[in-house]
Amino acid sequence: MTVKDILKALDATVSSGSEHLDQEITSAFASDMMSEVLAYSKGQSVLVTGLCNPQVIRTAEMLDITCIVLIRGKEANEEMIRLAEERNLVILETKYIMFSACGILYGLGLEGGTT
């Protein structure tokens, strides 16, 4: 699956990284707590979250996450967009709640990691 597939499936918009939509996505992790992402995320390439602050970008960078999906209609702020662009990260925004977004991605074959 590619970022472009996620973009379409979640009826999302691109806030950052439109030039990276062809990147392959192999797995996902979902959480609003970055401490959980740091503790349990292992090799996921997309992060589904409702948290909207620069810490999300820094966390994604540390874990080699290539795409962040902001849920519940959240919008990336200017600092998040700037940091994401500097780090070649994609930020997508969708109106779906976390449960629905994850269900759609899982239904398309995207798997989560194990702890």
Image (spheres, helix red, strand yellow):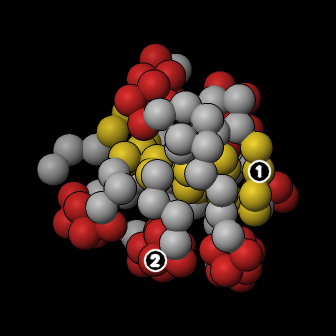
Q: Residues within 10 Å of mark 1 (few under 14, many from 20)?
A: some
| Residue 100, x across and y down, in percent | 45, 25
As rendered, which of 92 and 109 lies closer to the eye? 92
Report the front residue among 66 and 56: 56
Foreground residue, 39 or 101? 101
- Is residue 110 visible in this depiction of the protein? no
> Residue at image x 52%, y 72%?
53
x, y percent for residue 107: 46, 17
Q: Which residue is mark 1?
A: 14
SS category of the residue bearing label 2: helix
| Left or right of residue 113, residue 72 in this image | right
**Residue labelled with disc 2:** 55
Against 34, residue 47 (above or below) is above
- What's the distance in space between the residues labelled 2 and 1, CA to CA? 19 Å
Q: Please report the residue visible at 23 percent of the width from the left and 61 percent of the height from the top.
A: 36
Q: Is residue 91 above or below residue 9?
A: below
Q: Is residue 17 left or right of residue 57?
A: right
State the residue at coordinates (61%, 43%).
Answer: 73
